[in-house]
Image (tube, rainbow, N blue to C red):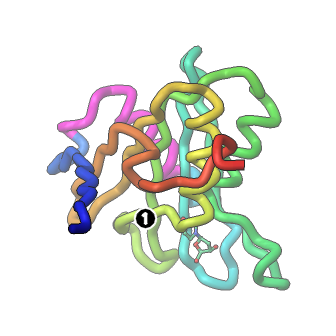
Amino acid sequence: MASELNINICIDVLDSAEELTQQEREAMEMAQQAASDAYAPYSNFLVGAALVLEDGTMFKGSNQENAAYPSGLCAERTALFAMSAHHPNKKIRMIAVTARRRSEQHFLPAMPCGACRQVMAEYEHKQHEAIPVLLQGPDGKFYRLRSVGDLLPFQFNKEHL
Ligand code: THU
């Protein structure tokens, strides 16, 4: 008889910014700021990501679109690649992501795309330590995940090569 493999993912749901730690609040505010600087003239969907590194350095990224659509890049990967180019040996302690429409001020649930999850997973695997992920959720809530692994179970990494 086939056995079953159940994967349990635990997400902390925080009802408002008041429930975030100070560092989480700062990271989310930086992500919100980054979203406002997004270069997204085609979708007008502004995404911001912020990274907190082990020494407290914060790094931000926003989506960068292009007239040749696939040449653009998501906010999360913009932040992660820039971070790794500038600080190749520093560990990431947190990733915060948010989004909004250009025409509206309120922030929307930010669900990283599959490619961004894969890239986050690469850096988590590289540093041998979980990277907590803080996502803007619906209605002013926030979702806190303990690791990128919770966003991408059954992930492909260099051990599979
Ligand atoms: N986008 C991101 O920046 N991150 C994601 O995880 C999902 C989508 C961007 C890409 C594009 O510029 C816009 O949102 C609409 O898809």
Q: Which x, y percent locates residue 61?
A: 65, 50
Q: Which x, y percent locates residue 142?
A: 27, 51
Residue at x 47%, y 52% (from the top left corner): 97
Q: Which x, y percent locates residue 5?
A: 27, 57
Lateral position of residue 42 relative to residue 58, left or right:
right
Q: Residues within 10 Å of mark 1 (few under 14, many from 20)?
A: some
63 or 156: nearer the viewer:
156
Residue at x 65%, y 48% (from the top left corner): 160
Residue picked out by circle 1 = 111
Residue at x 28%, y 29% (from the top left corner): 21
**Residue stretch in magenta:** 18-33
Q: Residue furthest top?
A: 55
151 or 29: nearer the viewer:
151
Mark 1 beta carbon near ligand 1 (under 8 Å): yes
In this view, 35 is above or below 113: above
Q: Which x, y percent locates residue 36?
A: 56, 60
Q: Count the marks: how many?
A: 1
In this view, 41 is above or below 126: below
- Main secondary structure along the magenta-highlighted residues: helix
27 or 112: nearer the viewer:
112
- Give the secondary structure at mark 1: loop
Say which amino acid is labelled 1: Met
Residue 25 colored in magenta in the image: yes
